[in-house]
Structures are given as C-alpha cells and as structure tokens.
Image (cartoon, helix red, strand yellow):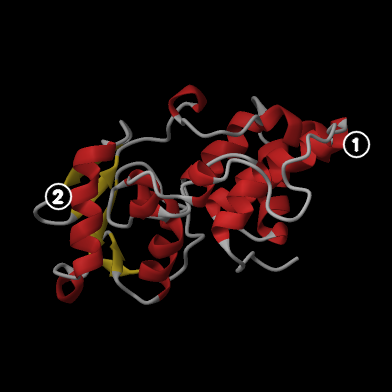
Amino acid sequence: MARYRGPVEKLERRLGVSLALKGERRLAGKSALEKRPYAPGQHGQRKAKVSEYGLQLREKQKAKFMYGVSEKQFRRLFAEAARREGNTGALLISLLEQRLDNVVYRMGFASTRRFARQLVTHGHILVNGKRVDIPSYRVRAGEKIEIVEKSKENPQIVRAIELTNQTGMVAWVDVEKDKKYGIFTRIPEREEVIIPVEERYIVELYSK
C-alpha cells in the first residue's frame, strides 16, 4: 500500500482526530475537523458501531498517517519493535520518533511532518554536518540536525520556528533557533510522546 497522498483534512475527519497534518491552519482553529467534527460523505454524521478489528485498524491508521510512513515501512518498524525486549507498542512509537523527518518536525524547522519530509528529500538537512536526504534515517541520541546555510532564511522554515513560540518544544531536543540547528538529546519515553494513538490496539492487530 502506497503512502497516502489525498486530502489530509478529510483523513482527519474520517479518523475523528487531529493528526497535526495541517500546521498553521490547525493552530489557528481553521481546520476542517473543528468546523465539521464528523466523517466526510453523505452518511458521515451517522454514529456507527465500531468492531474490535475496526478499533485496531483505526489506531494503526492514525500512527501511520501521522508519521507519514507507508504500510511496508510500518510493518518493518513493528517487526523490529517486536524483536526487541520491552513493551512492543512503546518501542514502536520510539522508532517512529527517531525518523529524521519527525525529528526535523519536533525541532520546529517544519510546521508539519509532511513539510519536514520535503526538506529532507530536497537536501535541506544536515546530520552531523553531512547532507542526509532519507526521511527514514534513524537519528541517534547526540546527533546534530541542521538546516543547510542557503536554506536558513527560507520563509516557511522561519515561520515554522516562529510558531514554536506558540506550540512549545519537546523535552528530548535542544534547539538553537537563531542558528537553526538542534541536538537530538535522547530517545523519549512513551509517556512523553503526546499523540492520539493507543498503540496497544496496533500490537493486538499484528499479533493475530
């Protein structure tokens, strides 16, 4: 299954939760989900009973679409989390948080993960001084993430950094906003990652 490229606001309405896919529009309270908090389509306002499988699938879709990964990538990450010792669901979230595009987003250099992915693929990001254009690159604790010199005045990047004054910064990154670089200081604990996903349902789904 390919990565989702359709209308993201319809996707959020269908899943009934904000997935941080619309950046500044979401922060301004102008997202379609706030205006129409029900599923799209003719029968969107009907309350349908959701099966156990439906709940499990919905949680997987939330995580997959939020982090912008394909079905194949998601399965690989889950398989890796399942092989490790510890809580599989928590490990899965940790692996997703270590993706380079997500770290760029967490550092406030992009207002959405989708834009962060574009910055990475278009060569605007350095990791420890070297250009890395692979969004799935796994960032390790202590690595330095930096905007390339020629892109530091990009209006979208500048605006995204300004928005962090409103949204705040997560505890596991240390960012120098003026110099547009940051350090991924550590892998976050699951309880620190505030996302609308109940990963236990994902574990149940893949454990069948």
What's under tag 1, amino acid-wise?
A: Lys
Of helix, strand and loop, which one carries label 2?
loop
Apparent side of residue 45 relative to residue 103 in the rendered image (left or right): right
The residue located at (64%, 65%) in the rendering is: 3
Residue carrying label 1: 208
**Mark 1 Cα shell of 10 Å, populated few (<14), some (14-19), many (≥20):** few
The residue located at (32%, 34%) in the rendering is: 170
The residue located at (36%, 41%) in the rendering is: 141
**Mark 2 Cα shell of 10 Å, populated few (<14), some (14-19), many (≥20):** some
Q: Residue furthest right?
A: 208
Q: Position of residue 29 (x, y in %)?
A: 38, 43
Q: Write down the quadrant of residue 89 in the picture.
A: top right
Label 1 and label 2: CA atoms lie apart by 45 Å
Of helix, strand and loop, which one carries label 1?
loop
The residue located at (75%, 31%) in the rendering is: 201
Q: In front: 158, or 38?
A: 38
Q: Write down the quadrant of residue 131 in the picture.
A: bottom left
Task: Identify the mark at residue 144; answer none if there is no mark.
Answer: none
Q: In front: 85, or 196?
A: 196
Q: Write down the quadrant of residue 54 in the picture.
A: top right
Label total for image: 2
- In the rendered image, is residue 137 in sight? yes
For the C terminus, give its image quadrant. top right
Task: Identify the mark at residue 177; answer none if there is no mark.
Answer: 2
For the N terminus, give its image quadrant. bottom right
Q: Position of residue 155 (x, y in %)?
A: 19, 68
